[in-house]
């Protein structure tokens, strides 16, 4: 019985651990010698299903390579964004210092800013802040949260926020 296209697509949506298991099992079936296959009761059947096992091996290995590259790519992008954020924290404007001081002084990971606050939006663009909610409160504004790496870095180096409020 030849699997349908929908069945193949369902296989591709499997979690990575299952894909690894399928790749290992199909590689074993393709590389095992005849006596091992005969012991498992697959000796005669392997001749007829060998092309399908090969296709399964190629497909699962290809999907695993793509998932690995995707994970690596996202990790690299995240690292680059974090490094850019560290560099940017050393060149904050006075208004950006005031915004980040609110987080540090209030010991809060979330604060509200006006929807038109360009400096808060710029810090979000630089991945120092993130929108904590997709909704805008009519009175309080947009909820922004500070990213974990920025929170820790500003607590390690509070001088980056300027002397105005930190020393008081």
Image: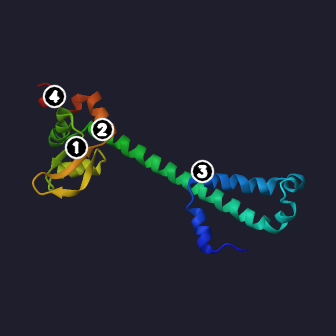
Q: Which of marks 3 and 1 precedes in the sequence?
A: 3
Give the alpha-carbon distance from disc 1 to disc 3, as whole Å.
37 Å
Q: Which of marks 3 and 4 precedes in the sequence?
A: 3
Counting the numbered discs, the total is 4
Can you tell which mark lies on residue 17?
A: 3
Give the alpha-carbon distance from disc 4 to disc 3, as whole Å.
49 Å
The image shows residue 23 at horizontal and vertical percentages of 68, 55
The secondary structure type at the circle numbered 1 is: strand
The secondary structure type at the circle numbered 2 is: helix
Q: Nearer the viewer, mark 4 or mark 1?
A: 1
Give the alpha-carbon distance from disc 2 to disc 1, as whole Å.
13 Å
Q: Which of marks 4 and 2 precedes in the sequence?
A: 2
Give the alpha-carbon distance from disc 2 to disc 4, as whole Å.
17 Å
Q: Determine which residue is flagged by label 2.
A: 150
Can you tell which mark lies on residue 166?
A: 4
Corner quadrant of residue 62: bottom right
Q: Which of marks 1 and 2 precedes in the sequence?
A: 1
């Amino acid at each position: 019985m030849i699997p349908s296209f929908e069945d193949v697509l369902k296989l591709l949506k499997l979690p990575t651990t299952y894909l690894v298991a399928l790749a290992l099992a199909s590689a074993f079936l393709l590389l095992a010698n005849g006596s091992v296959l005969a012991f498992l009761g697959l000796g005669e059947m392997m001749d007829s299903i060998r092309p399908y096992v090969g296709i399964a091996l190629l497909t699962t290995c290809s999907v695993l390579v793509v998932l690995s590259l995707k994970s690596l790519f996202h990790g690299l992008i995240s690292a680059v964004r974090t490094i850019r954020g560290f560099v940017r924290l050393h060149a904050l404007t006075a208004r950006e210092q005031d915004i980040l001081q609110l987080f540090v002084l209030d010991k809060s990971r979330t604060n509200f800013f006006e929807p038109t606050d360009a400096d808060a939006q710029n810090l979000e663009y630089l991945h120092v802040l993130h929108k904590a909610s997709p909704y805008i409160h009519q009175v309080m504004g947009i909820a922004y949260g500070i990213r974990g790496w920025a929170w820790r870095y500003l607590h390690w180096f509070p001088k980056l926020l300027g002397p105005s409020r930190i020393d008081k």
